[in-house]
């Protein structure tokens, strides 16, 4: 394992252990893992007092709602990481949740949709565009489009592309990846959404080849690929890697380390999520609102909102 990845994973484990030792009675093991992951891939230092205060502030303002439970720890984390003055964003978040609910959207994901639109000037307009895209997705892939895809329709609505063109791009990825090793279904649709968001049209075939290479290499090294891992393979493929095999070896080393670590042995799928994010080498840019992946030669942007959308999938399925 290279020095950079060792440093990231040690930071991840250190944050995990600090939260577990101080707040173990208030927060589940799986939520601690998500919080530690978000901090370890950001450049914000973990401050237990701020994290606890922010979580309690959210709880005091929401009353009886899903946000009063463990989700408040995750929202507190992403607000702290993204904003210099996170306490000022709580009321705006709650206002957005109310707007999302007025659109009769899926309450299970309303929190993440509200966060994604936190800096949006015209939330209602974006929600209307998102709803149109979601219905188009249902028309194209009726059997595999469900409520979990609404979060990504919100992201796709920001792309500014013609809806028909957007659907053509998603279909292109879906059909071509299904020709090889990717099983048809919602996970492949999720991967297709990610590629439509982060890849320019001239690189479509390159990233498709990269996705297939990464998938096969990970399988050969004994990693089970399911759920949101498809989307993360898409992020990896968007960076034109000079040595895919070397990157997968690094992922494998982090993955097997976590699998042999106390409190991490049971959820191997989430260990793989952490391993991929560790090796992706995310760099924080633009005042905590944008990441880029890769080096100066090969890199792609990762909007913070996409990271949150992927997170919503992890929370709902793992």
Image: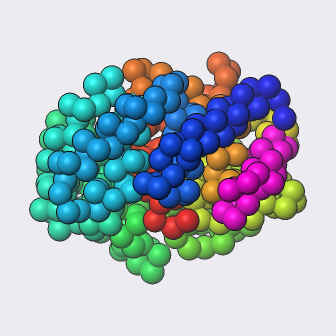
Q: For the stretch drawn in magenta, what is the main secondary structure? A: helix
Residue 261: say if magenta: yes
Instruction: Name the one closer to the observer, 61 or 272.
Output: 61
In the rendered structure, the answer to whether residue 253 lies left or right of residue 191 reads right
Q: Residue at x 76, y 32 (%)?
A: 6
Q: Residue at image x 34%, y 50%?
A: 72
Q: Where's residue 151, x and y in %?
A: 36, 57
Taking the image as shown, residue 94 lies to the left or right of residue 237, namely left
As for residue 125 lying within the magenta part, the answer is no
Quadrant where the C terminus lies?
bottom right
Range drawn in magenta: 248-269
Q: Position of residue 8 (x, y in %)?
A: 67, 32
Question: In this orientation, does residue 223 appear?
Answer: yes
In the picture, measured across the screen, residue 113 lies left or right of residue 253, that is left
**In-image side of 242 versus 53 (left or right):** right
Q: Is residue 214 visible?
A: no
On screen, 132 above or below 239? below
Q: In which quarter of the image is residue 130?
A: bottom left
Say which quarter of the image contains residue 281.
top right
- Tell me residue 1's x, y (percent): 84, 35
Of residue 234 and residue 266, the one placed in the foreground of this image is 266
């Amino acid at each position: 394992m290279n020095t950079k990845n060792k440093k990231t994973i040690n930071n991840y484990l250190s944050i995990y252990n600090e939260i577990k030792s101080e707040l173990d009675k208030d927060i589940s093991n799986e939520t601690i893992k998500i919080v530690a992951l978000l901090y370890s891939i950001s450049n914000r230092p973990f401050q237990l007092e701020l994290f606890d205060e922010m979580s309690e502030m959210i709880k005091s303002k929401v009353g009886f709602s899903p946000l009063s439970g463990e989700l408040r720890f995750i929202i507190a984390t992403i607000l702290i990481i993204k904003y210099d003055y996170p306490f000022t964003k709580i009321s705006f978040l709650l206002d957005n949740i109310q707007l999302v609910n007025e659109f009769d959207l899926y309450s299970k994901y309303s929190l993440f949709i509200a966060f994604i639109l936190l800096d949006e000037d015209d939330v209602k307009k974006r929600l209307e565009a998102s709803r149109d895209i979601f219905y188009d997705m249902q028309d194209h892939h009726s059997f595999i489009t469900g409520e979990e895809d609404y979060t990504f329709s919100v992201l796709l609505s920001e792309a500014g592309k013609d809806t028909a063109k957007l659907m053509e791009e998603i279909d292109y990825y879906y059909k071509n990846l299904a020709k090889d090793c990717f099983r048809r279904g919602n996970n492949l649709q999720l991967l297709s959404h990610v590629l439509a968001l982060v890849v320019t049209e001239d690189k479509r075939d390159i990233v498709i080849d990269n996705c297939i290479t990464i998938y096969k290499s990970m399988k050969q090294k004994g990693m089970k690929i399911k759920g949101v891992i498809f989307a993360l393979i898409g992020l990896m493929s968007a960076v034109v890697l000079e040595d895919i095999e070397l990157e997968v070896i690094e992922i494998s080393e982090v993955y097997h380390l976590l699998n042999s670590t106390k409190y991490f042995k049971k959820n191997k799928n989430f260990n793989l999520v952490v391993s991929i994010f560790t090796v992706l080498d995310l760099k924080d840019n633009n005042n905590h609102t944008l990441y880029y992946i890769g080096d100066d030669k090969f890199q792609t942007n990762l909007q913070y909102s996409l990271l949150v959308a992927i997170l919503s999938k992890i929370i709902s399925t793992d």
